[in-house]
Image (cartoon, helix red, strand yellow):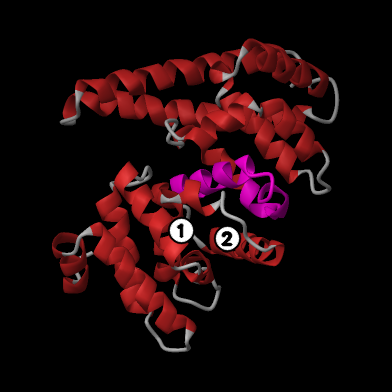
Amino acid sequence: MDDPRLSVLSTLGDLKGILRFLDYHLGLQEAGRDHESAIHFAMVAVIIKSGGFQADHLTVDYIEDLIRDSPSFAKGVRSMMHPDLAFRLRMSTVGLIAVTADQRFTSPVPPQEMSEFCERLAVFADESIHGEYLQRCGVVILFEMLRSPEWRGHIVPSPWSMFVYCAQFPGERESFWWCLENAIDLLEFTKGLAGGEELKWWYGTLWFHHEKLDAKVRDEVERIAKDMSTGDGLSDLNLYLSLIKQEVERTQQEVDELPNQNRPARFGMDLRARLAALEGNYNKLARITRGRR
């Protein structure tokens, strides 16, 4: 972060110029020249300029213009996930993709490239230490891919476990609400997959966000839990309880630390509301499994 090149890119260059700079160096990398450092710092600068996990309209417009004018841009970014490339470059690539994910997974991509990217994301997830930033990035990308009927069938089994971090997901993103609104259809989709990991983690995600589901979906999610509690699914329900409890404890610690932090009042209100929701979801699931553990 202290590299002078990043300082120049993030403070002197405007966002459109940085994106053009990134596109230029992606092209040189594709031509066989080593421009990893320039690409990494340009990606970090875009992330900083974009303000984090939700790109503003200006960023979206610039990205759309760039993808239209330079069809190789999106492919070039995805190619930076190759396992042989430096870990920090792949980390900045994941960050950039998370910022602009709603553009990444709505444009047509050949099936082979979708499968290749998902496999490389799985390799990266296995290598990383899953710090909070990467956890959030991974969940953002998963929700965006899950929303896309073209992409969701290419997600390999192992990244689905990153939904364990779904309680930290930025809830303002459209993909999040789309997936919750279409939760039953996505349950049916995951039931049809052979591995079982997909269904396990998507169903667990619905318990993390149980209070946000509409009444019809909540009833179905609870019915499934009751069926699971009398059979082999009890171990998965106990896993969800353990994970939700851990998130309750983590959030409670954040609430306890609020008086010592210089945070806006709204942050504290949102945090306490999230804690109450998690506790409610935990208690609901605990009542279903009580006496069967």
Magenta region, main secondary structure = helix
Q: Earlier in the sequence, mark 1 or mark 2?
A: 1
- Asked which secondary structure carries label 2, the reply is helix
Q: Which quarter of the rendered picture does the C terminus lie within?
A: top right
The reply to whether residue 124 is visible in this rendering is yes
Magenta-drawn segment: 135-160
Residue at the (34%, 64%) spot, across then down: 43
Q: Position of residue 9 (x, y in %)?
A: 21, 66
Q: Is residue 282 above or below residue 166?
A: above
Q: Position of residue 53 (x, y in %)?
A: 38, 45
Q: Which residue is mark 2?
A: 121
Residue at the (19%, 26%) spot, across then down: 264
- Asked which secondary structure carries label 1, the reply is helix
Residue in front for this viewpoint, 214 or 31 = 31
- Left or right: residue 105 compared with residue 137: right
Residue 248, numbered label: none
Q: Name which residue type carries label 2.
A: Leu
User: How packed is label 2: few (under 14 Cα within 10 Å), some, or many (20 or more)?
Assistant: many
Q: Position of residue 137 (x, y in %)?
A: 46, 49
Q: Which residue is mark 1?
A: 94
Residue in front for this viewpoint, 42 or 187 = 42
Whether tag 1 and tag 2 are in contact, CB under 8 A, the answer is yes
Residue at the (74%, 38%) spot, across then down: 199
| Quarter occupied by residue 6 | bottom left
**In magenta stretch: residue 168:** no
Q: CA distance from mark 1 to mark 2?
A: 8 Å
